[in-house]
Image: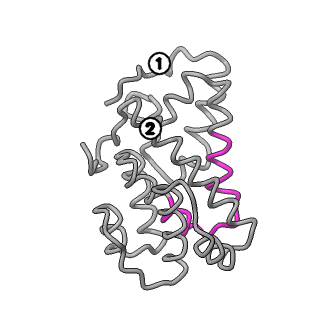
Amino acid sequence: MTRLSYVDCGSLTPEQQELYESIAKGPRAAKRRSLVDEKGNLTGPFNAFVHNPALGRHWSAIGEALRFHTSLERRLFELAILVVAAHWRSGHEWAAHAGLARAEGIAADVIAAILNGEPPPFGKREEEIVYTFAHELVTERRVSSANYEAALSLLGEEALVELANTLGYYIALAAMLNAFDVHPPKGLEDPWP
C-alpha cells in the first residue's frame, strides 16, 4: 500500500529503465527479495526513486555506497538504521532492516528494546556506543562531546562520517516512506500498521 502511484514497469522511460534495472538487479537484490512485487513494481522508497530518475539515481547511489562500499561494520550499520526506523516509526524501513540486523548478530532482545523505545540490554560495548551516538543524533539532533568522542575512538573519522551519513540517509528515506504512507511488502511484518 502506498499513496504514490506505482510506476508502470512496462512503460518506463530509458532513464527510468536504467534506474529500475540498477535497483532490481543490483547488489540490493541479492540481500532482499522484496525489492520488486508480484507485478514487477519496485517497493519501498525505490518506487519514488523511479518517479524522478534524475533525483532517484543519486539517492540510489548514496544508499548503495553506504550499504556496500563503506568500512562501517555491517552489524553496527544495521543497528543505526533500526534507531532511525523506530524513532520515525517507519514500518517499511524497520521490516527491511530488522532481519538484516538479526542476521548480522544484533541480539533479539536488543532489537525488541529498540522497537519498544526501551534502553537496549547491550552485551557488546561497541553496539552501545553506536546506539548512543545514533539515538542522540536522531532524537536530540545533536551529539554530546562525550558520545562523539566515544564513537570517534571506536570507529575513527572515516567510519564516523559513514555513520553520520547513514543516519542522515535513512532519516530522509523514513521521511519519504512516511510521506507516501509506504508499508512493507507482503510477508514482512509492519510494527506500525
User: As displayed, is residue 154 above or below residue 181?
Assistant: below
Q: Which mark is residue 174?
A: none
Quarter holding the N terminus is top left
For the residue pair 2 and 122, the one nearer the viewer reads as: 122
Quarter holding the C terminus is top left
C-alpha distance separating marks 2 and 1: 15 Å
- Mark 2 or 1 closer to N-term? 1
Tell whether position 77 is magenta: yes
Say left or right for 98 vs 74.
left
- The residue furthest right is 158
- The residue tagged with tag 2: helix, strand or loop? loop
Say left or right for 191 vs 66.
left
Tell me which residue sits at (46%, 38%) in the image: 175
Q: Position of residue 158 (x, y in %)?
A: 75, 65
Tell me which residue sits at (67%, 59%) in the image: 162
Q: Which residues are magenta?
A: 60-80
Residue under numbered circle 2? 44
User: As displayed, is residue 171 above or below residue 54?
Assistant: below
Amino acid, disc 2: Gly
User: As displayed, is residue 143 above or below residue 62?
Assistant: below
Q: Position of residue 114 (x, y in %)?
A: 35, 65
Badge 1: residue crowd in 10 Å (few <14, some 14–19, many ≥20): some
Q: Position of residue 102 (x, y in %)?
A: 41, 68
- The residue furthest front is 145
